[in-house]
Image (tube, helix red, strand yellow):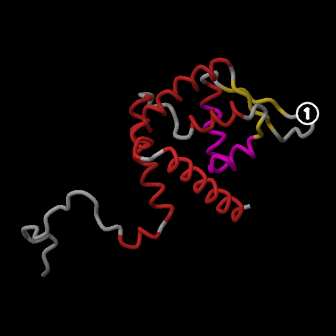
């Protein structure tokens, strides 16, 4: 009969300090981007201190504010969420009084999105917290490196988004 209890062995390998070998993950763009995003999202959630604030609310609100009348379909494409997730985010923001949907007169199936004055105020508060949250990451890069990173990330986005259309 075989025991299901693991033997009591001392760990011959000390826990690594600092950076570890990523192995095959060093070749995976999605992992490297997601790893940074996970850390930034977790610390931003702590700063926002609102357990009912769904992930993606800030970027969704910012895109609507920058593009009044944006359709839900275009918003979904730009934030990279499926349509059901975008609807849930919009429902949450509408319940808070931050956004409103307006049915298109040309196509009754389409809704145009707008930020309310309350949403503008919420966006302003969140923007300050996002800048605070990302300050250390920005400080790690020179202004030129930040600009280059932005260009490269946008280039990757366009390539990935185009392949999914």
Q: Residues within 10 Å of mark 1 (few under 14, many from 20)?
A: few
Q: Is residue 14 magenta?
A: no
Instruction: Please state the horizontal and vertical placement of residue 75, each as a whole percent of the image.
Output: 70, 43
- Position of 101 with respect to 132 (left or right) is right
Q: Could you tell me what secondary structure mostly forms the magenta stretch?
A: helix
Instruction: Please state the horizontal and vertical placement of residue 34, each as a whole percent of the image.
Output: 47, 54
- Position of 145 with respect to 2 (left or right) is right
Q: Is residue 90 magenta?
A: yes
- Position of 51 with respect to 58 (left or right) is left
In the picture shown, does residue 6 fall above or below 137? below
Residue 98 placement: quadrant: top right
Q: Residue at x 50, y 63 (%)?
A: 29
Image quadrant in which the N terminus is located:
bottom left
Image quadrant in which the C terminus is located:
bottom right
Residue 16 or residue 10, whichever sits in front: 16
Q: Residue at x 58, y 26 (%)?
A: 123
Instruction: Please state the horizontal and vertical placement of residue 107, each as a whole percent of the image.
Output: 89, 40
- Position of 13 with respect to 41 (left or right) is left
Instruction: Please state the horizontal and vertical placement of residue 78, each as a whole percent of the image.
Output: 67, 47
Q: Residue at x 70, y 33 (%)?
A: 66
- Please provide the residue range marked out in magenta: 72-92
Residue 112 or residue 136, whichever sits in front: 136
Q: Secondary structure at mark 1?
A: loop
The residue where tag 1 is placed is 105
Q: Residue furthest right?
A: 106
In the picture shown, does residue 130 fall above or below 3? above
């Amino acid at each position: 009969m075989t025991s299901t209890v693991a033997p009591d062995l001392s760990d011959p390998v000390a826990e690594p300090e600092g950076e570890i070998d990523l192995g095959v993950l060093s070749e995976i763009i999605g992992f490297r981007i997601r790893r940074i995003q996970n850390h930034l999202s977790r610390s931003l959630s702590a700063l926002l201190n609102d357990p009912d604030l769904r992930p993606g609310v800030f970027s969704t609100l910012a895109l609507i504010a920058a593009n009044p009348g944006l359709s839900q379909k275009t918003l979904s494409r730009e934030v990279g969420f499926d349509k059901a997730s975008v609807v849930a985010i919009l429902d949450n923001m509408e319940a808070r009084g931050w956004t409103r949907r307006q049915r298109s007169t040309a196509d009754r199936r389409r809704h145009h999105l707008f930020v309310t004055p309350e949403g503008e105020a919420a966006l302003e508060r969140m923007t300050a917290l996002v800048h605070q949250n990302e300050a250390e990451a920005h400080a790690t890069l020179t202004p030129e490196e930040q600009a280059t990173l932005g260009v490269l990330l946008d280039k990757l986005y366009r390539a990935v988004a185009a392949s999914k259309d």
